Amino acid sequence: MLLKRAFSKPQKFSVYRKQFFFEVNNIGISSLGIISIISIFMGGVVTTQAAFGFTSAWVPIYAVGFTTRESIILEFSPTIVSLLLAGKVGSNIASEIGSMRISEQIDAMEIMGVNSASFLIMPKILAAVFINPFLIAISMFLGLLGGYVMGVATGAVTSNQYIVGIQYGFMSWKISYALFKTSFFAFIITSVAAYNGFYTSGGALEVGRSSTRAVVWSCILILLADLLITQIVFTH
Amino acid sequence: MIEIKNISKTFGDRTVVSDVSSEFESGKTNLIIGESGSGKTTILKMMVGLLKPDTGQVMYDGRVFSEMDERQQQEVRKEMGMLFQGGALFDSMTVEENVAFPLRMFTTFSEKEIRERINFCLDKVKLENRNHLYPAELSGGMKKRAALARAIAGNPKYLFCDEPNSGLDPRTSLVIDDLILELTTDFNMTTVVITHDMNSVMQIGQKVMYLYSGKKWWEGNNKEVLTTTNKELLDFVYASEFLKQLKPGGK
């Protein structure tokens, strides 16, 4: 019901467009810093663990690069970073909308004749679905870069071996699959958070509870969706 | 004119508003007074459509608002302005962005016209040169005035004020009351004010409805309040120790 209200026809396109770009910045661009740091470290750790795990002489050393690429592109960037965004962006959305609800700001919008669900929720969902794939693409690049720096700096792999590894058996559809997953996760994060925020009642304590509930449910649904999408894509 | 006809509202097994009818005239400040929990805010919420009456009707100039669907109600709401108890200004927007919000949303005004309207509204509520402040940077009285400026920005036909004086000192309360009266007269609005402040009743109570336990107990104007023989209303009006001395028949 809430999503139906949220996706009803915008009352004024120019205002919604402005709000969309505001949310792109608020939800997406402002998360770039934390995503960059985590991605670089994540790539470094995966490379190190792969390098020290492959002790058999039968496993070529370029497999370190291959393993890093597969892990980062298929799971770490789309799923782990989305879980991180569920915490950062999800709690932010739920507490923002929840605070607006308890301080009567949403009622004020309704009385002006504004469809508050549409104005507050639709730009957030669209912005996240639009910008998150870009964030994840950057995360993939930085994850692979972090792996390269860590691998070469520790002497676990040479530059050449790593680059050969990340190119080995590359299938471009996996990137599309990961980015599709990301968009779906972005929808889960924003819609679950908006729902919890929008139906907050009470005071500051309930806003905190809504925020926590939004993060917990987003994480569970992301993992469930990940399992289902992976199952569908890799068995067909 | 706004009419409420036999409206009632029950939450669980508690009847908060019971069979209340009244007419709120245009160009006048219509006050709904009563003790805390007497159903004032519930009536206001039913009038603006935030709550649906269990029975009865809310009518705006003959249009049955309470039976409209959401989209039709949104259209009528564009003719409303509301001053909330806490102001309900949008935290993420400056004062001028708050005032401009309904204009940008529902009018085709140019930016120049919007700016002129913002300045006019802020000037009306005597809040000039505060355009770029955020709500968190305003005092309680300023927040109320900024919210009032936003409420009148869209040139509403109906103005609702939910306890406009709560949390304000007596002097600032008088300023807010004067503003409400002045705006009502200037723009010929139908204004409905929820209050339990007796200063407001005396100052702007052109029409007063007294609620007691969710029922309409008395109706009149601010002059008649002082001469009423209604026991419950007298107890309400002369509740403070100071005013008890003035109560007809003493304590």
Image (cartoon, coloured by chain):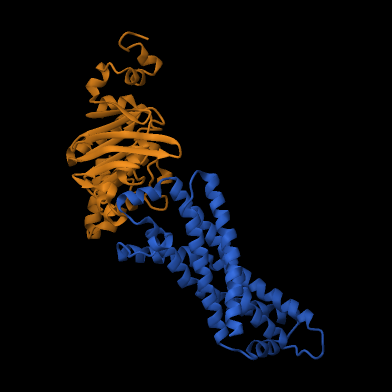
Chain colours: A blue, B orange
> Within the image, what quadrant is residue A163 found in?
bottom right
User: Does residue B235 show up?
Assistant: yes
Q: Quadrant of the N terminus of chain B?
A: top left
Query: Residue A50, position in %: x, y?
Result: 74, 80
- Residue at (35% x, 42% y) in the render: B54
Answer left or right for B105 relative to A94.
left
- Residue at (35% x, 11% y) in the render: B245
Query: Residue B66, position in %: x, y?
Result: 29, 47
Query: Residue A43, position in %: x, y?
Result: 66, 76
Up/down of A29 relative to B54, above or below: below
Answer left or right for B168 relative to B188.
right
Numbered marks: total = 0
In this view of the protein, which residue sits in the foreground, B129 or B187? B187
- Residue at (52% x, 77% y) in the render: A180
User: Does residue B178 show up?
Assistant: no
Q: Quadrant of the C terminus of chain B?
A: top left
In this view of the protein, which residue sits in the foreground, B65 or B27? B65
In this view of the protein, which residue sits in the foreground, A147 or B157? B157
In this view of the protein, which residue sits in the foreground, B5 or A171? B5
Query: Residue A139, position in %: x, y?
Result: 58, 74
Up/down of B222 relative to A207, above or below: above
- Residue at (26% x, 55% y) in the render: B72
- Most extreme residue toward the right is A56
